[in-house]
């Protein structure tokens, strides 16, 4: 997709989309992507009636807000996020000669504050979120909600906003726990992760999974542990036992069939692994849950 400036309003015009609506759980008033090749300045002394979330992808912005000491300017860098609350003055401008590009969303609703809290997105503070996989696709999907304008567009737009906030929240948590992980995107092992989740009943080896990603076994193990916190073998075992728990509690399948469905040809071995993971035998687990 080429870099381009675009904006979409729920009520057709920017002025009419500047609303506060506490009768709805979550409502996206407008959204877009700003591309400014030369200096610009936006100044809103009275702020807006809704929440305003900015996500910078290129350039540098000097920003100020009524929530922050005006004597201490803030700067928004690529991969950073800033949220202006309703009814608060704000101002931002180009901080250098670079082209500026950022995504923006204005939203309202009685669930807005809860969404931001759950995703740990603070008001009036710069936060680094990096460049989460698929985040720009999420914004484009949000824009499509305004283009299609179906009876479910408001619901779809709210769902996309929720996904965007969740991705940013996950990215901030990941950054704080493991700064190196941002540089190891999940797409590097996505093919094998997807394969193992869909094929728990089959024999799975680290060598096979590494080959899917065109990686050496040692490098694959290292990436896998960084991204999941577990070794490939421990992760596979955990997924198999989790699936076995579902089958035990939700079906009446014989134990041998359940063992086979999660990749264990020997029901006795399956029982030992299950007990080691859960502290119970499969039979005891089924009896207690049912």
Image (cartoon, rainbow, N blue to C red):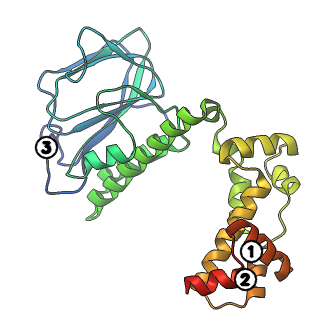
Residue at 72 percent across and 50 percent down: it is 230
Residue 145: x, y in percent? Answer: 33, 54
- Residue, x 64% and y 31% (percent of image)? 180
Pair 3/1: label in front: 1
Mark positioned earlier in the residue sequence (3 or 1): 3
Is residue 187 left or right of 172 when viewed as pictured?
Answer: right
As measured in the structure, the alpha-carbon distance from the residue carrying label 3 to the one carrying label 1 is: 52 Å
Tell me residue 179's x, y (percent): 60, 30
Q: Quadrant of the C terminus?
A: bottom right
> Which label is found at residue 89?
none
According to the picture, the residue beneath numbered tag 1 turns out to be: 262
Which is closer to the viewer, label 3 or label 2? Answer: 2
Residue 62, image x and y in percent? Answer: 33, 14
- Crowding at mark 2 (Cα within 10 Å: few <14, some 14-19, many 20+): many
The reply to whether dot 1 and dot 2 touch (C-beta < 8 Å) is yes
Q: At numbered mark 1, what does the secondary structure look like: helix, strand or loop? A: loop
Residue drawn at point x = 44 percent, y = 13 percent: 98
Q: Which mark sits nearer the N-terminus, 3 or 2?
A: 3
Q: Which residue is mark 3?
A: 19
User: Distance of mark 1 from mark 2, alpha carbons?
Assistant: 6 Å
The residue that label 2 is drawn on is 258
The secondary structure type at the circle numbered 2 is helix
Neighbour tally class for label 1: few under 14, some 14-19, many 20 plus, Cα within 10 Å: many
Does residue 107 appear in the picture of this structure? Answer: yes
Q: Residues within 10 Å of mark 3 (few under 14, many from 20)?
A: many
Estimate the x, y position of residue 25 in percent, counting from the top left: 23, 56
| Res. 8 in view | no
Question: In the figure, 27 relative to 59: above or below?
Answer: below
Distance between mark 3 and mark 2 Cα atoms: 54 Å
């Amino acid at each position: 997709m080429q870099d381009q400036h675009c904006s979409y309003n729920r009520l057709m015009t920017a002025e009419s989309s500047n609303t506060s609506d506490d009768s709805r759980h979550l409502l996206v008033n407008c959204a877009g992507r700003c591309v400014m090749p030369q200096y610009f300045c936006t100044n809103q002394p009275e702020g807006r009636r809704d929440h305003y979330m900015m996500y910078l992808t290129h350039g540098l912005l000097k920003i100020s807000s009524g929530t922050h000491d005006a004597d201490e300017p803030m700067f928004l860098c690529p991969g950073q996020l800033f949220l202006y609350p309703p009814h608060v003055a704000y101002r931002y401008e180009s901080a250098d000669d670079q082209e500026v590009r950022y995504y923006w969303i204005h939203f309202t609703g009685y669930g807005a504050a809860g969404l931001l809290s759950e995703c740990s997105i603070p008001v009036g503070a710069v936060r680094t979120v990096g460049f989460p996989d698929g985040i720009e696709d999420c914004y484009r999907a949000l824009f499509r909600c305004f283009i299609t304008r179906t009876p479910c567009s408001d619901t779809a737009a709210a769902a996309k906003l929720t996904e965007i906030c969740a991705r940013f929240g996950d990215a901030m948590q990941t950054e704080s726990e493991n700064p190196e992980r941002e540089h190891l995107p999940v797409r590097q092992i996505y093919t094998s992760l997807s394969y193992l989740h869909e094929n728990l009943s089959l024999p799975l080896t680290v060598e096979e999974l590494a080959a899917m990603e065109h990686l050496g076994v040692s490098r694959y193990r290292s990436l896998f542990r960084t991204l999941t916190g577990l070794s490939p073998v421990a992760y596979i075992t955990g997924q198999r036992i989790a699936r076995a728990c579902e089958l035990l509690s939700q079906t009446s399948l014989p134990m041998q069939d359940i063992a086979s469905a999660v990749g264990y040809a020997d029901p006795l071995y399956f029982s030992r692994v299950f007990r080691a993971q859960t502290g119970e035998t499969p039979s005891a687990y089924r009896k207690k849950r049912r």
